Amino acid sequence: MRGGTLHAPAGSRDRDGERPPTRLPLVVHVLALGTFLMGTTEFVVAGLLPEIAQDVQVGVARAGLLITVFAVGMIVGAPLMAMLTLRLPQRLTLVLALGVFAAGHVVVATGSGFALLLAARFLTALATGAFWAVANVVAARAAGPAARSRALGVVGAGAMLANVVGVPLGALAGQLTGWRGPFWALAVLGAAAMALIARHVPDDGPGRATVSIRSELSALRSGRLWLTLAACATTTGGVLSTYTYISPLLTERTQLAAGLVPLVLVGFGIGALAGFLLGGRLGDHRPHMTTIVAPAATTILLSAMCLLSRQAAPTTVLVVLLGLFGLGANPVLISLGVRFAGKAPTLGSALTVSAFNLGTAVGSWGAGIALDSSLGAQGPAAVGTAIAALTLISATVLALTRHRRPTPPAAQTTAAAPGIPGVRPSNGLGGRRSTNRRRHGIPVSRGTPTGAKGTGTHGTRRSHPCVE
């Protein structure tokens, strides 16, 4: 409401004066289809490594570089491509990213040299980073402030669904048609997604301001943005450092049959999908509560996994719950990254993508060292516990500083009322309305301080003189 009404705290139900929509725009689900393809290509290689290694005549460990180079491409590519495509319309950026995505898969499907496959995977990762960064911004804008986290949860759920459906189907297709088959399929689906994006993503509109690299980089001065990025890295690093080496834990320490491990992984994927969607919904109402509760629960679950890893049933349940809570804060953190980046939402979104992948890379590296230590198969879960606990530091600081709001652009010409955050400035007599009343000879009451009883000219109860 205009006229000096006190703002509700960040994260409230009507944070920006809007009620959350019952349905999200169709474009949000179209973008989720794109992230489904991105998530599938990132992880499908893991199930095809022996076949790829044999075909291109390298060892399996060396073939694993196809996964590493993709992660590096995502870390570097997301902010880099966000800067390079800064002046392009967002719809064009998404279409071009999918075009490069499809072309990269054609190169992989037809290539014979290992160096060529590595280059194609790196190029595909650059396109993936660009798509992720811009898709988050477009989805948040389309849903509006009242449903921003929920929309980002749906977009991110596309990648979670990839682990449940896309990666197993890709591995099955690779066994039936050869390892190149899934890459041909992803190329065709990427081309089809280009048409959907071109049709359903709206124009930027004439209101989009011209931005420069310098103005985008000014977002890096935000301390809360860096706290958000730290939380992105640690929350994902804690979960995926454990998940990367979950098979040795289940087979060597829990003594679970190897044939049952894929079922446990599917349970994790289903939990992660549900957690992403639930976290997005909760984040629109209680963002800081979500970013604290999720890593706190994750830390407890990982600690319990270290203690109960010799028992099959509890460990299986813990893995599913780890999927549910472990990544539940991610859509909220993306939303906060976009928000705290101010005038550089695309860079903020890109940096969250980089932070997620950096946390995964560093966490997996540390978990691998722990696996080879005296801790054995229990080591990755111990490393994950320590990393996940670090998230509570940055998340708590963000929650404590949540009332610090940047001055909105529209209010740059007016200063806030002294001592009353979020209240429009007033001359103590009702501002412009009081001045107009004087011009017409209408008496004006000064009112009484907040909490005291008093009546104005017409017998109506008034509160603080700066509040109307």
Image (tube, rainbow, N blue to C red):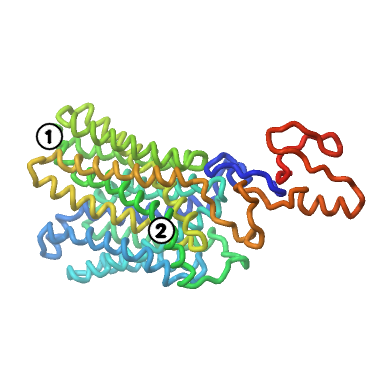
**Residue placed at 27% from the left, 30% from the top?**
317
Q: Residue furthest right?
A: 441
Q: Quadrant of residue 329?
A: top left
Marks 2/1: CA–CA distance: 37 Å
| Residue 193 seen in the current view | no
Q: Residues within 10 Å of mark 2 (few under 14, many from 20)?
A: many
For label 2, the residue is 132
- In front: 57, or 142? 142
Residue at screen point 92% across, 50% down: 441
Image height of 406 relative to 318, above or below:
below
Residue closest to the eye, 390 or 310: 390
Number of numbered discs on residues: 2
Q: Which residue type does callout 1 highlight? A: Arg
Quick check: 446 above or below 198? Answer: above
Seen at 55% across and 40% down, the residue is: 12
Q: Amino acid at mark 2?
A: Trp
- In the image: residue 379, left or right of residue 339: left
**Residue at 26 percent of width and 32 percent of height:** 318
Question: Where is the C terminus found, in terms of image quarters?
Answer: top right
